[in-house]
Amino acid sequence: MYLRPDSQSVYDVAQVCLNGHVTNGFSRSSPEFNETFCSNCGERTITVCPACNHAIRGQIAGSMIVSFPAPSFCHNCGEAYPWTARSLTAARELAEELENLGTEEKQILSKSLDDLVRDTPKTSVALVRFKNIMRKAGGLEAEQLKSTLREIATESVKRALFPGV
């Protein structure tokens, strides 16, 4: 466990598979629930950021939260965790499959994805671009892209794109 300096709250360490399934939000205080490989997908699990080797922030000690989402980015170095990077890669590949779009629209869409998974000053611009392009794109590929984005988008983007979810 480690102390968060600004609030004095104690966080445990999360164990997450490389595809983003949280296998244990309390990997240090409840190691009996740890999994070397994810029971959902079979992928290897980690407890530290591959970029900086800092512990992945888990649940607050004593928390009774049943569902704990995997963080998208390391709070220590800011790098995307493997599951975020993999999902962004998949989203970009899906964008390339959108048959109703031209090359320039696909490039704009691909660049916009980075601002849909982080809260930045350009997030609102990226959101408008994404909605406009998705209206034109249509089809199964567009629905799959939205589904992939639903997993990694910021909460504000999720509320805008998927109201009521």
Image (cartoon, rainbow, N blue to C red):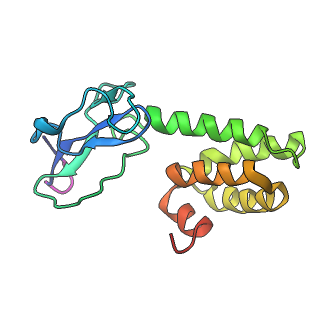
Task: Report how many numbered discs are placed on residues in the image.
Answer: 0
Tell me where residue 4 appears, x and y as whole percent: 19, 48
Can residue 80 be seen in this snapshot?
no
Magenta segment's dominant SS is loop
Q: Based on the displayed image, in which of its 4 quarters is residue 99 positioned?
A: top right
Q: Is residue 147 left or right of residue 71?
A: right
Examine the rendered structure and indicate whether residue 81 appears above or below residue 153. above
Tell me where residue 24 appears, x and y as whole percent: 23, 42
Tell me where residue 27 appears, x and y as whole percent: 17, 38
Q: Based on the displayed image, in which of its 4 quarters is residue 160 positioned?
A: bottom right
The magenta segment: 4-8
Specify whether residue 139 is painted magenta: no
Q: Is residue 131 left or right of residue 165?
A: right
Tell me where residue 82 appears, x and y as whole percent: 45, 31
Residue depicted at 22% across the width and 50% down the height: 59
Residue depicted at 64% across the width and 41% down the height: 91
Work out which residue is located at the far bottom of the displayed protein and give it.
164
Residue depicted at 60% across the width and 53% down the height: 147
Q: Based on the displayed image, in which of its 4 quarters is residue 57 positioned?
A: top left
**Viewer-side residue, 41 vs 117:** 41
Residue depicted at 58% across the width and 67% down the height: 162
Can residue 14 be seen in this snapshot?
yes
